[in-house]
Amino acid sequence: MVFRRIFGGKAGSSAYVLDTSLFVNPDARKYFGHTVHDAVVNFLAVAAKAKGIKFYMTPSVVKELKYFAEKELPSFKNIITIKAPSLYELKIPAIIMYKFIDELRSRVNAGLRVSEKFVRDEKTPLEEKLHKLRVQYKESLREGILDSEEDFEVLMLAKEMAATIMTMDQGLVKAAEELGVKCVSIDAFYDHMKEA
Amino acid sequence: MVFRRIFGGKAGSSAYVLDTSLFVNPDARKYFGHTVHDAVVNFLAVAAKAKGIKFYMTPSVVKELKYFAEKELPSFKNIITIKAPSLYELKIPAIIMYKFIDELRSRVNAGLRVSEKFVRDEKTPLEEKLHKLRVQYKESLREGILDSEEDFEVLMLAKEMAATIMTMDQGLVKAAEELGVKCVSIDAFYDHMKEA
């Protein structure tokens, strides 16, 4: 049981919350398969053998996966437990929200600077300007920060179940670090597999 | 003691956390004075007579007030207590942060739509475009939402001291309502004074 050694060993936990990125991120697909469907099928096959390890997924991540999948996903059977975090019961330290608001304020300002730059730009063709605006605006406002309810739910479910998050999302990793929630990336996970 | 009847009566609390807006918002200035300095002086004069009522202000609100004031502010003496919230000890329900992230995502998208509109606009003069962009971008991303660490500190201090917030800021009012923290606006407060 390679999985048991990895999960029960270094990571020090036997419960994992799976993030959408594990199945849709291009860097992740290379490990489990090139389509979302294949990635889920292959993950389930490996996970089914990993006795003693619990895998969780939030309903909103399931919904995202279904949206991204090319065809109907296979049944998770009892391999992945679907559970939402108890958002009305869980609490977070106020300092976390304080830091988040602080970070956001600089990002909102950065987003405005990006927008101003492209409003001033009279040389670049319109479609190119719009494309660059969207990319740079998203970078300013959303990259490396907890930018979706789905990510927040993953974080809270991991906290609730004292589980480790498997994610490729840097914003989620950063938020998990602040809250003292463990994270493993698919890369670290794959390296462990190769070593095992 | 008009103040004592108002604060100790309907508001049902004898501790108030004062927000910057009370002294700098144009709608508030008409009650206490037309400059920030006058507003503070007049507020202190009235508050000094309101025995049995505690007034709190966060260090960051004091800093903001000093920034906005035309000249050096008078001493708060023992009339206003300066205290920061215990951000490392206080906790907030996870659902609050969840809703905040949800709201933000739509606002970030709205901000991009505003930016795209002005990048596409080839008729309006540049300076006018930039001005409108800044106004509409700020409306999309910051109005009616908890948009600063200072506001969040006011909210948390009120929670910590079981106090009522005196603010004109709609984002702060909304956040206070979600957390069950009491708010009075200067308008309601002034109406009470006239009635008393």
Image (tube, coloured by chain):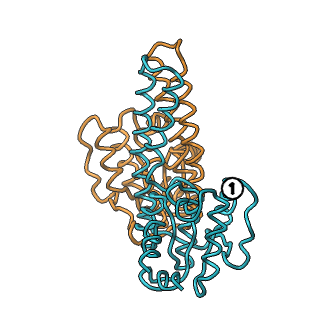
Chain colours: A cyan, B orange
Viewer-proximal residue, B44 or A83? A83
Q: Judge whether A72 appears above or below A128 on screen.
A: below
Amino acid on which the number 1 mark rests in the picture: Ala
Q: Mark 1 Cα within 10 Å, few/some/many (few <14, many 20+)?
A: some
Q: Judge whether B98 appears above or below A47 on screen.
A: above
Give the residue at mark 1: A69
**Element type at marker 1?**
loop
Question: Is residue A107 in view from this perspective?
Answer: yes
Extreme residue in the left direction: B72
Q: Residue at x 43, y 34 (%)?
A: A112
Residue B112 lies in what quarter of the image?
top right
Question: Is residue B180 in view from this perspective?
Answer: no
Residue B42 lies in what quarter of the image?
top left
Q: Is residue B59 left or right of residue A181?
A: left
Q: Is residue A16 left or right of residue B38?
A: right
Q: Is residue B74 left or right of residue A186?
A: left
Q: Is residue B64 left or right of residue B9?
A: left
Q: Residue at x 51, y 64 (%)?
A: A167
Viewer-proximal residue, A53 or B98? A53
Could you tell me residue B8's position as x and y percent?
Answer: 53, 62
Could you tell me residue A71's position as x and y percent?
Answer: 74, 56
Could you tell me residue B50's position as x and y percent?
Answer: 42, 57
